[in-house]
């Protein structure tokens, strides 16, 4: 017998149907007991999940459900909340016609969390280019969720992407922009906003009383006293001084190349990096299968695996579900903590 959970189920958006999301959801359900996962319900297509399970010879009962009944059902079957938009199912083959269903899953899951019908949102990866081709206006989940949070709460939301691994947490200050745009978009205001949200959410969500934040320099050797680029001295350093004066435990800019080795990692709780790859390469290199993408700065909890849609292996049974399992586990942990506080 399983003790009933006092929490509403987690909402798991199916992500890109041509990718590994459906396979990961199936495999995560199989790991529900070994990983002590809270009940989750997939926002997706029951027939697609049944056909993926059959193709992969995974014996998984799949039941159409709703948020109210999902938790009770979860221990004997994978609950699926069907989407209105239709989905064409071909692993590895993108179809812009599927974008509506992909967006609906995220939107419905978010609204359910906001209404208290779900405890947190966990998202399977989306193929960003396919959504852009269908007219999606946001760079990714992070910004879309910021816009939804703003609509639902009526308050400005500043979503911040955190990559949380077992031994390293990083945040990119600029995210999905070309490298030659970084210098334009890396502003003192952006650093201050992200650092303040990080400080607050590390305290409230992760229970770290005085979070130690470091900032990686954008240029080699953090600019070598302004001789190899000016951004470190002119943009990052003054903003860090202001944040220190506010009482934040923050230092930098520190040379990025010596910030991620084992000894350096002991000296901080989170590193703010200037651009996407500076933040994501070290975490994915250290722990690709265990790192979780968490959105800070939202009035609800959202987690996701660190990886993408992996179209190259979709439908082949090769996808490793561990990062999604970690994302579901962390969403459960953060939800329980939020309920207790
Ligand atoms: N949270 C999200 O929605 C994310 C979405 N993406 C999107 O995913 C798409 C593909 O991105 P890529 O840069 O190719 O990265 P990717 O993570 O999808 O794939 C990179 C390589 O890692 C492998 N891989 C990824 N996850 C795996 C898993 N669980 N098990 C085994 N192998 C795995 C893939 O097979 C591929 O060889 C892009 O459209 C990107 O925007 C990328 C990251 C996060
Ligand atoms: N590379 C990280 C990534 O693409 C995650 O983006 P998001 O969809 O979580 O905003």
Image (spheres, rainbow, N blue to C red):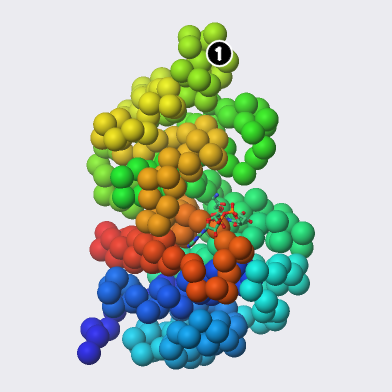
Query: What is the x, y in percent for residue 35?
Result: 29, 71
Query: What is the x, y in percent for residue 289?
Result: 40, 57
The answer to whether 281 is drawn above or below residue 3 in the figure is: above
Image quadrant of residue 181? top right
Q: Residue at x 53, y 87 (%)?
A: 54
User: Taking 309 as reference, is 294 left or right?
Assistant: left
The answer to whether 243 is drawn above or below residue 98 in the figure is: above
Query: What is the x, y in percent for residue 34?
Result: 27, 74
> Which sits in the foreground, 38 or 244?
38
The answer to whether 315 is drawn above or below residue 263 in the figure is: below
Image quadrant of residue 37? bottom left
Residue on which the image places disc 1 = 228
Q: Residue at x 61, y 64 (%)?
A: 311
- Badge count: 1
Q: Residue at x 31, y 50 (%)?
A: 166
Regarding residue 260, the answer to whether it shows in the image is yes
Q: Residue at x 33, y 33 (%)?
A: 261
The answer to whether 335 is drawn above or below residue 234 in the figure is: below
Asked if disc 1 is less than 8 Å from ligand 2, the answer is no
> Which sits in the foreground, 201 or 222?
222
Regarding residue 106, the answer to whether it shows in the image is no
Instruction: Name the image quarter holding the C terminus.
Output: bottom left
Image quadrant of residue 199? top left
Instruction: Name the image quarter holding the N terminus.
Output: bottom left
Callout 1: few (<14), some (14-19), or many (20+) C-alpha neighbours within 10 Å? few
Query: What is the x, y in percent for residue 247?
Result: 32, 28
Q: Secondary structure at mark 1?
A: loop
């Amino acid at each position: 017998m399983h003790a009933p959970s006092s929490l509403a189920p987690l909402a798991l958006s199916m992500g890109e149907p041509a990718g590994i999301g459906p396979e990961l959801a199936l495999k995560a359900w199989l790991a529900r007991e070994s990983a002590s996962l809270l009940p989750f319900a997939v926002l997706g297509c029951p027939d697609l999940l049944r056909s993926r399970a059959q193709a992969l010879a995974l014996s998984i009962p799949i039941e159409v459900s709703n948020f109210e009944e999902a938790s009770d059902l979860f221990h004997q079957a994978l609950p699926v909340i069907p989407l209105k938009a239709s989905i064409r199912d071909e692993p590895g083959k993108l179809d812009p016609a599927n974008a509506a269903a992909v967006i609906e899953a995220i939107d419905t899951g978010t609204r359910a969390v906001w209404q208290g019908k779900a405890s947190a949102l966990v998202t399977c990866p989306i193929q960003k280019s396919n959504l852009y081709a269908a007219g999606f206006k946001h760079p990714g989940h992070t910004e879309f969720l910021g816009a939804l949070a703003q609509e639902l709460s009526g308050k400005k939301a500043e979503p911040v992407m955190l990559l949380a691994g077992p031994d390293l947490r990083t945040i990119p200050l600029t995210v999905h922009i070309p490298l030659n745009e970084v210098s334009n978009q890396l502003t003192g205001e952006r650093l201050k906003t992200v650092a303040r949200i990080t400080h607050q959410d590390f305290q409230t969500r992760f229970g770290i009383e005085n979070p130690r934040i470091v900032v990686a320099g954008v240029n080699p050797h953090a600019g070598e006293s302004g001789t190899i680029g000016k951004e470190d001295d002119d943009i990052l350093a003054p903003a860090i001084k202001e944040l220190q004066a506010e009482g934040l435990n923050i230092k930098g800019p520190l040379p990025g190349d010596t910030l991620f080795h084992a000894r350096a990692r002991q000296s901080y709780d989170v590193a703010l990096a200037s651009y996407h790859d500076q933040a994501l390469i070290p975490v994915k290199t250290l722990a690709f299968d265990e790192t979780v993408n968490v959105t800070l700065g939202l009035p609800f909890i959202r987690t996701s695996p660190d990886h993408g849609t992996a179209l190259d292996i979709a439908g082949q049974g090769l996808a490793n579900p561990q990062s999604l399992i970690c994302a579901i586990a962390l969403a459960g942990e953060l939800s329980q903590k939020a309920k207790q506080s």
